Image (cartoon, grey):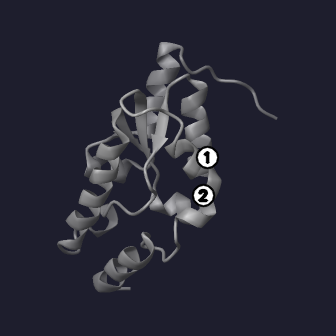
Amino acid sequence: MDAADLVRLVRETGSPYGVDPLPPVGAAVREALQTEARGTTDFVYVPSCESVAFDPSVLISAVSVLQSAGVGVRVVHPSCCGALLRDRGPAAAEFREAVAEAIALADGRRVVAEAGGCAEYLGAEPFAVVAAELLESGLLRPRRVE
């Protein structure tokens, strides 16, 4: 698949994988979008288009982890931020700007991205770093699961 095909897929579906990101995530995203009042949200969470397309439980689990630490979370619309396309032409900046606008509208104190590449591209904090910080601070406590 060439860069033009990837750009077309992202424009049509919001995903470089050709999967409309909202149906797989459905109610979980809609609920997380509305959990906090504007200006009070601790974290704006940017899911990766890959996990949304192939394993939406990653998004649901990450939001659950953040909420269990007692922090407010808003999830931005899970569309491609353009990180996969950054070396393939100017369309990447178009997608980054769209996600940046969604982040600004979410009005959170910190931006955390699920994928490290997306975090770097968007200037956000990687989820793994934030989770480690929450563990170190005692806000997040590990628990045994069966």
Dot 2 alpha-carbon crowd within 10 angstroms: few under 14, some 14 to 19, many 20 or more: some
Q: Position of residue 35 (x, y in %)?
A: 54, 36
Amino acid on which the number 2 mark rests in the picture: Val
Q: Residue at x 42, y 73 (%)?
A: 16
Q: The C terminus appears in which quarter of the rendering?
A: top right
**Distance between the alpha carbons at the discs numbered 1 and 2:** 8 Å
Q: How many marks?
A: 2
Q: Quadrant of residue 5?
A: bottom left
Q: Pick out the residue farthest to the top.
A: 138
User: Considering depth in this image, is 51 or 14 the residue closer to the camera?
Assistant: 14
Q: Position of residue 31 (x, y in %)?
A: 59, 45
For mark 1, what is the residue?
60
Q: Is residue 120 above or below residue 90?
A: above
Q: Is residue 67 left or right of residue 133?
A: right
Q: Quadrant of residue 113?
A: top left
Mark found first going from the N terminus, 1 or 2: 2
Q: Is residue 46 visible?
A: yes
Q: Is residue 55 visible?
A: no
Q: Position of residue 43 (x, y in %)?
A: 42, 33
Q: Residue at x 56, y 51 (%)?
A: 30
Secondary structure of the residue carrying tag 1 is helix
Residue 124 bears which disc, if any? none
Dot 1 alpha-carbon crowd within 10 angstroms: few under 14, some 14 to 19, many 20 or more: some
Q: Position of residue 22 (x, y in %)?
A: 54, 63
Task: Evaluate if marks 1 and 2 touch, with contact meaning CB atoms under 8 Å apart.
Answer: yes
Q: The N terminus appears in which quarter of the rendering?
A: bottom left
For mark 2, what is the residue?
25
Amino acid on which the number 1 mark rests in the picture: Ile
Q: Pick out the residue farthest to the front.
A: 37
Q: Is residue 80 above or below residue 28?
A: below
Secondary structure of the residue carrying tag 2 is helix
Q: Residue at x 30, y 64 (%)?
A: 82
